[in-house]
Every structure is written in structure tokens, then in C-alpha cells.
Amino acid sequence: MFILTSDPGEKPLDSIPKLAESFPGHVDIPRLREGRLGGAFWTVWAPCYDIVGEDPGPDFNTPTSALRDSLEMLDLIQNMIKQHPDHLQFAHSSQQVKEAFAAGKIASLIGMEGTHLLGNSLSVLRVFAQLGVRYLTLTHTCHASFASSAGAGAPLAEVHPGNGLTDLGRELIGELNRLGIMVDLSHTSDATAKQAIALSKAPVVWTHSGSRALWDHPRNVPDDILRLIGDGPDKNNGVVQSVFYPPFIGPPDAANVSRVADHIEHIAGIVGKKHVGIASDFDGMYASVEGLEDASKYPNLVAELLARGWAEDELRDVMGGNLMRVMDAVDALKEQLVDELPSSAVWEKRTDLPATSWGGNKDSGAPSYFPLEVQSTIAELYPRHDEL
């Protein structure tokens, strides 16, 4: 969600108390309560570099503001939860979700959308894991050093071989499994999705996507990829959660709650009802479908599925039970991998490693911070070649 300010002099953190009142957008606490929401993922996100006029360069090595912005967004989320203790309760596991629900609170989990936020670094990922992030979307609408994106609608020029994962992206999947962070495939190219499914030892998720067979948009999941999900030894035990964004649901004159249910049922017809869920993308889209205009309208979708013959236990699964099962499986794998060392992989196109210049350059008069023995070792390993 977005934290908006009401006047130019107001700071983002100052807007947090206003969530208890009517707030611009799709989400505020009164509408969450009216929609009877038991839990929500609050997403760490910042726009792709092209949206804000930045350019990371062809090798993604030029710094952008995305990492700073994502840390500030995470700080906003943490403070939002803390400042509304009567309504929101932080949760990191399915058990904590249940505890929050039993206490009458909205379980508040943290997700992260796009590896363009990571500064090309698995070390940064590990820090975000410590800060409570539970899922990571492998791309947003732009390519990143880890993976290829499906874009925003128009085709994106390929920047990685095969339009899928890079070598660092392959390491990323293993590290997400080790850290207990769910692999989210919304926004990714088809090649990225297929490779991630093949590599992940844990169930994967699509946090907000639809069916491409029902509406042909690159952000939706094609049937051949859906067939990789489900029960059985050759399938990934993941979950596909349906989005409410009209351009993904279609057609423009009939993007409504019934059409969202059509997407859910088509996906369930391939993957099974144990592998579907409900998302939204509220406050991450300019409009929502008719009948699901904001967070107060979730009961309309429940009523639609009941009218179609979904049983109460199936509805409990689609409303969150399936996703919590995935969380439990991801957590169980994390426990199995607890003795594994973190990946030492770095972005293969980085030019600043080894960081020999950190010791200063005595020829330029700059102070040297490395011990003399280290300076001598660097001089032997990386001799200077002066031009004649």
C-alpha cells in the first residue's frame, strides 16, 4: 500500500495515524474491518528505475535509489503495525497468523516486490530476511540483475540469455529456500518462472496473477506453467493467487467479481483447489474490478464462490489456508537447511570487487587504512602496470 501525505510539509511517517480513518486509495483500517480481513501482506516496493527516470546501465551497476526507498518503505510498514496495535499484529508464520486472528487483530506480514530493490546483492537479501520479509517477487515490471521480467504489457527487450534467470538469479532461488522466503513468480517472464520452479525445493507462489487462457496478458500465467503446479511427485506444491486488476482480468466492459471467480476456477481446474488463493493488488493499481473496488468488498467474492458451489472448507483454503500451508512447507525446508552456509555468489558483472581501492592510494596522498602486510599482499596480487 502507499502512505500518502495530505500536504507538502507532511512527512510520510506522519500519515500513519490516518489509516484509522478514511484514507485515499483502496485500503484503510475501517475498510479492512468491514471486509473482515484476517490477515494481509504489506509489500515493500519502489518503482522500477525507468518509472523514476533512473538508469542502472546495461550491466545494472549504476546505483539507483531503489534500495534506499525499499528500506524506507519497510520502516513505514513496521511503524504502521506498531502504531495500530488494536487492529494490526505482526506475523511471520502461519501460527502467528492464527494467534493474531484469535486476538481479533489483522495478521500483518511483510512481502517484497522486485529484485531491482536488492542492489544486485544476496547480502542485502539476507538483511531483509532478518527484517521479516516472507516473500520476494523475482521481478517487477523491469528486468533486474537476477531475472527477466514479463514487463507491464508491451514486450521487453531481452537482456539476459534465454530471457530467464541469470547465474546470480539461480543462486537467489537456493538462498530464498535457505532463508525461508517464498519465491513469488508474479511479474516474471515465462522462462524465469519455469526455471525457478525447476530449481526451488520449496513451493512457489504467484501473489497476484490471473489466467492467461482467460485473458491474454503477459502478467497472467499460461496453462503450460500452471500444469507444473499441484499435487504429485513431479509437480510443485505451490499456490496461484488471483489478482483484481481489470487489465489482467478483462474484458474491459466485464471486469467484475464474477470474472475474478472465473479466473480462480480456471486455475483450480488445472492445479486443484488446494493450490489457489485470493490476492488483490490493492493500492498497487489505479483501479479494481467491479464488485471488488476496495478492501471492504472481499465478502462479495466469498459469496460468488459459495453461489458456484464451493464448500466451506474449500473457501477456507482459498481465503488463506492454502497459502499458510505453503508457508509451513517453506519454514520446514528452512529448518532442514539450517546448517547450510549462505551463498557467496556475487553479481558476475560487478566491477568494484576485489575492493583494493578501499585501502587508499599512497601515490595520490590519500590515507591508507590497510595494514602494511595487507598493502604488500595487494601489491603482489594486483601489480600496477604504468604506461610508458
Image (cartoon, rainbow, N blue to C red):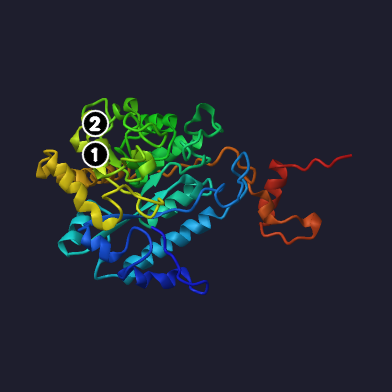
Residue 70 visible from this viewpoint: yes
Residue 284 position within the rendered picture, expressed as x and y whole percent measured from the top left: 40, 52
In which quadrant of the rendered image does the N terminus lie?
bottom left
| Location of residue 187 with respect to 107 vertically, above or below | above
Name the residue type under label 2. Answer: Val
Ranked by sequence position, the earlier of labels 1 and 2 is 2
Residue 316 position within the rendered picture, expressed as x and y whole percent measured from the top left: 15, 46
Comparing 351 with 205, the one in front is 205
Q: Residue at x 22, y 63 (%)?
A: 33
| Mark 1 surroundings within 10 Å by alpha-carbon count, few (fewer than 14), some (14 through 19), many (20 or more) | many
| Location of residue 254 with respect to 24 vertically, above or below | above
- The residue labelled by disc 1 is 276
Q: Quadrant of residue 220?
A: top left
Mark sitting on residue 271:
2
Comparing 297 with 70, the one in front is 297
Say whether marks 1 and 2 touch (CB < 8 Å): yes
| Mark 2 surroundings within 10 Å by alpha-carbon count, few (fewer than 14), some (14 through 19), many (20 or more) | many
